[in-house]
Amino acid sequence: MQDERQEWISKRAYSLWEASGRQHGEDHEHWEQAVRERADLEKVALPEHLRTKRNSLDADAATQKAIASRRQPRPKPSGEVPSLRP
């Protein structure tokens, strides 16, 4: 996950550099802005069960547990076929 995060930050910093007219010497500012944007995104988009995990195995196990806890049992078929006509 760290590699994915670094890649996102790198691409975002590059995009900011391009948007600013490709000016030389502002790479640090673009990088810091990208880091801040990623942190803000993670606060909103990253599920709570992944925020505290230290490695991918912990995250994978937590993801599976979260998915299992949210699954709803499917209703059993009643044998009737619903009519499409009013």
Image (spheres, helix red, strand yellow):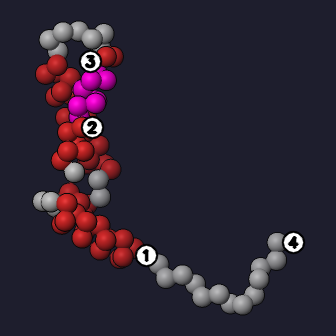
Q: Which of the 4 quarters of the picture holds residue 59?
A: bottom left
Disc with the residue nearer the chain's start (4 vs 2) = 2
Q: Amino acid at mark 2?
A: Trp
Name the main secondary structure of what is drawn in magenta.
Answer: helix
Q: Which residue is mark 3?
A: 17
Q: Which residue is mark 2?
A: 8
- Residue 24: x and y in percent read 18, 9
Q: Secondary structure at mark 4?
A: loop
Disc with the residue nearer the chain's start (4 vs 3) = 3
- Mark 4 or 2: in front is 2
Q: Is residue 22 above or below residue 32?
A: above
Residue at image coords 30%, 10%: 21
* Mark 1 → mark 4, Cα distance in angstroms: 32 Å
Please provide the residue range marked out in magenta: 8-16
* Mark 1 → mark 3, Cα distance in angstroms: 43 Å
Q: Amino acid at mark 3?
A: Trp
Q: Is residue 74 left or right of residue 52?
A: right
Q: Is residue 51 above or below residue 86?
A: above
Q: Which residue is mark 1?
A: 71
- Mark 4 or 3: in front is 3
Do the residues under discs 1 and 2 have CB atoms within 8 angstroms? no
